[in-house]
Image: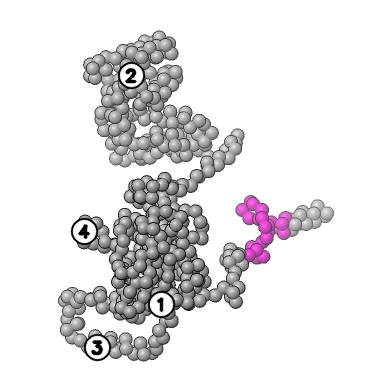
Amino acid sequence: MSVPLIKIYFRDLKLTNSVFVRFGHHLRGKPPTIAKSLKQKLEEQNYQDPTLAFKVNIGFAQPKTSRSQKLTERLKYLKERRADKDLEKLARTQQLTIPLDKVREEWQESGAAQHIKTVAEHYGVFQHLYGDAYFFPQVMLNVRYRQQGDDCFAIVHRGNVIKPAEAAVMPEVSYKANPDSLWTLLLTNLDGHLMLEDSEYVHWFVGNIPGNDVGKGEVICDYLQPFPPKGTGFHRLVFVLYKQEKRMDYGSFKRQQPCLCLEERTFRTQDFYRERQDDLTPAGLAFFQSDWDPSLTDFFHNTLEMQEPIYEYDFPPPYIRPQEWFPLRQPFNTYMDKYRDEKQIAKEYLLKKLKKTHPFRKPDPPPKYPHAFRMDLNLPSWLRVEKKKERLGLPYSKYSSPMASLVLTDSSQLTSDSQHLDFTGGFGACLFREPCIDVLTRDALADSMFLEVVYQELLLTQLIAHSDLMFVWVLVVAILPVETGVLGWVTELTRGRNSRWS
């Protein structure tokens, strides 16, 4: 009687303990019902006191409009349009044209300021310019870059991409303003400083602009094109238009023109505005994104006279777990190749491709129905998979080795490379010639020492490109045993060289 009771006791104990086991693995940490979710952890990590962290509008106040009045006007306009028979006829005959200029003007008068503010917050423009401050762009700032040799422009909208080559010259800026007013225009790069994290580069600084005539303003810092370094992604370049209450003195920011010293262009918009917030009010905003292009290499070397900075990420080598005696569910060939020498693997695949590649003929077309061929079921599974890949024209295997990736090229590329090697001369070039392919695969590939000579010669082809064939003859005879197959192969090489390439 005691035995069944003990069995029942251990069975219940096992059930109670199995709560902490999932898919054969023990849960670490607190149970899901007690542990905090990722959302809760992020909220705790990014928590800000609302009494200290709150947004402040530093621009002009948003004009208040009655929503009911706006809705009444819209309904009235729709009623008039629907009653217009001529408009209905043009729409049916597909001859109705929409005046985009009037649509843009209406958008600027209605909801443009709110829309631009929303997009700027999405890109983090206000956060990086002013911290916890923002403004509604009440003045529509139109910026465009004239392209060389053509009457076309690259227009700056709100976050569109403009390449550095397209923004190489000073842009054309226009806006509506009273002729008696004074303005300040700033262009800064929020992500481009090479040394300091919380600083910017000022690319253009014009102050005391009378009305909307930017050309008559005082140039504090001349225009410098965007130069995002390679590997740093997209940079945000922001135009901000300030309305001045009086004539400003920017003597401390005055730079000698042309200013090509990046250290002198270091700028902080937040500090600049904090010192002059009583006399400046941000009113216009436009920004674009720019990333590296090949024209910047010449710009860094010849204009800035500095070495081009390139940012690259050094990936750690892939982790390979320790080898096991009996690996389960692992393909035999790919698992074993993880622990082999990469050069040896590249050598095997190179020789395998040389057997099937002809330097003067196109590669054989793939079979029309690759899976129609009978497969020997006695072969191991990994070998059957490799044969299927070979028929489908897929790579034999996936390697992280750079040498193996050079070997695993298509036949057309190998043929073109062999043709380049063919005109350089030397023993490696002779390997790719037509008379020696069959002899190479029949006699020479059986000897392991000869394979080593072939492989080393293929790697050193460019170094001994113009050497005489007699040197290679002596090298092969001195290293290899004197056998009929090898000497016959070398003799045929010499015959082919003298008959075709002498």
Q: Is there a contact, CB below 8 Å, between mark 1 and mark 4?
A: no
Residue 104 point in image, percent of width and height:
29, 75
Q: Earlier in the sequence, mark 1 or mark 2?
A: 1
* Near-viewer residue (326 or 319): 319
Q: Earlier in the sequence, mark 3 or mark 4?
A: 3
Instruction: Compute the Cα span from label 1 to label 2.
Output: 81 Å
Q: Amino acid at mark 4?
A: Asp
Q: Earlier in the sequence, mark 4 or mark 2?
A: 4
Q: Check the image and report above or below for 359 versus 396.
A: above
Q: Nearer the viewer, mark 3 or mark 2?
A: 2
Q: Amino acid at mark 3?
A: Glu
Secondary structure at badge 4 equals: loop
Residue at the (57%, 73%) spot, across then down:
53
* Near-viewer residue (213 or 494): 213
Left or right of 193, for residue 140: left
Q: Quadrant of the C terminus?
A: top left
Highlighted range, magenta = 14-36
